Image: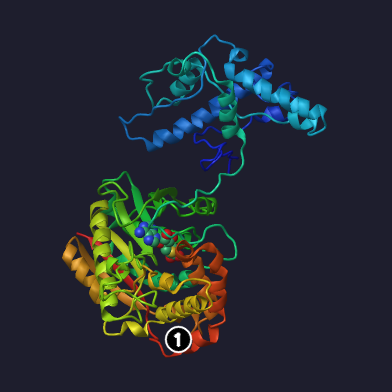
Amino acid sequence: MAESFPMNGGDGTYSYSKNSHYQVPEELLDKTSPAWNEGKINHTSSSDEVANAYTAQFQKDMKIFLNARAKEIVIGGMMVLLMPGLPDGVHHSELPIGVLFDSLCSSLMDMVNEGLINESQVDSFNLPLYAATPKEITEVIEDIGCFSAERMEIADTRSKFGSLVNVHSLIMTLRAGLEGRGARKAKGKMAESFPMNGGDGTYSYTKNSQYQREATNVAKEMINEVIAEKLDVQSLIASSSNSFCIADLGCSVGPNTFFAMQNILEVVDKKYMTQGATSGSLDFQVFFSDHASNDFNTLFASLPPSRKYFAAGVPGSFYGRLFPRSSLHLVHSSYALQWLSKVPEELLDKASPAWNKGKINYTSSSDEVANAYAAQFQKDMKIFLNARAEEIVVGGMIVLIIPGFPDGVHRSKLPIGVLYDSLCSSLMDMANVGLINESQVDSFNLPVYSATPKEITEVIKDIGCFSIERMEIADPRSKIGSSVNVHSLIMHLRAGMEDIFTKHFGREVIDELFGRTFLKEAEISSALESSYKNGTQLIVALKRE
Ligand code: SAH
């Protein structure tokens, strides 16, 4: 991968968002070359050799850039570029930005003199930035030959902010752009999103998503079959220039999403080959989508380098539109739709029969509570399917993997309920010793739901745009072995739910809460023994009609 120097992220004092990072021309790193840029950090006040090396690098990069865009942009489409430049005939040394670079350079030299850094560090350092002339750009464009230059102008940026330049803010701008530390994580600020734990620490989703991964392996076979049998890849892509678009909704931070996408891509490609195409003739676009507060930095930093697809991130809730009309061929979502858009409102009303006192989920609660959850699930699922109906092309498919259980099994038998009850009893213990208030527990409810085939079928029939190609209850344990590791189940729960507990009870009680729950491992194990033992994973394949 080419080196990248992200702008300062976040919205702190030194942040900015913009981008321009080319590679430093190689000659500049060679001490014996005439382009060795001793005591300088850019080409603006350097020798012609240095400036020429910069120009050549710019032209090389610009060619790669334009060639890539030529493949991506439809005929008749346009490109608008705004970049630093200078008029033909003006010498590089007259570039105003050069004054700033020289000044930064002279600060570095002062630091050399004070022994803070080495002079050789300055000699070998060069900013990979270039301001081009119209002539240079025109040459590259003509060389590529796929674009006509419709307009090219040099504008004076100062015309918009008065003639007096604020040098302080210019230096701040430089710092934001060139400091080059990794982008910082954007902190989640949205009300109704509870992202998985980011990063790769002990409690991160990355480190604690094994269960989900193994569970989804069970679904793999069925997904592969249904794509092979039911998806007409050839006719789907006929109107999309041979590109096949897949979205993973609720992708989290990886790695599970990468395995799932890779698998789907291979099956689709194989299917396409059976339809007479040659392998590799499809372009795959994968949209990784999750709440905006999801740790997309971790996701993107860990994208498999050998991937055979173009990756994009799409932020937002899947309970709403995320993509343009008829733009997707296949939608995948695994272990995300159990998250309701919110806790059903009745549960927050003390006067309602659905007030969920001393409980945090519906599995061991009254029918009123369970009905409120069921109604919320159906409402959310309708919104989800209606949005997807607009986004998926006719003939395209949705594959869903969600926690679920067979019709006829009582909710109090759900294994996951055992874990929620155990967390709830830890909370009650903490209320008893005064660490939290009991009323906090009463008003807290997990917005998660396990559906039955009947419930889902009802919603799908109601919407009417999708045919049910497959619906199955699978048993994820068949792949994991029969003895469940309670410890890792709790770790998994923490990775997925820490955020929602933190928002309600405060960060300081989280270790205590999960610590107390770990002490209940034996109890949980035996309660799991008497819970429902078979399939808890619903796999649904739908086709857009
Ligand atoms: N699909 C992955 C991750 C599952 S974790 C896997 O199988 O391992 C569930 C993910 O769903 C989380 O990242 C969470 O942020 C996301 N999610 C929950 N509700 C969502 C919503 N309404 N919109 C988008 N993403 C959502």
Quarter of image, ligand 1: bottom left
Residue 48: % across, % down:
66, 15
Residue 276 x, y percent position in the rendering: 32, 55
Crowd class of label 1 (few under 14; some 14 to 19; many from 20; radius 10 Å): many
- Residue shown at 42%/49% (left/top)? 313
Amino acid type at circle 1 is Leu
Q: Quadrant of the C terminus?
A: bottom left
Residue at the spot x=52%, y=43% of the render?
10
Task: Using the image as rendered, state which of residue 418 and residue 337 is in the foreground.
Answer: 418
Residue 366 rendering spot, x and y as whole percentages: 29, 81
Residue drawn at (58%, 40%) of the image: 2
> Dot 1: what SS?
helix
**What colour-coding does the image apply?**
rainbow
How far across and how far down the image is residue 128, in percent?
61, 30
Q: In the image shown, does 510 or 183 lie closer to the viewer?
A: 510
> Which quarter of the figure has residue 32?
top right
What residue is disc 1 on?
528
Q: Does the image show residue 266?
A: no
Quadrant of the frame with the N terminus: top right
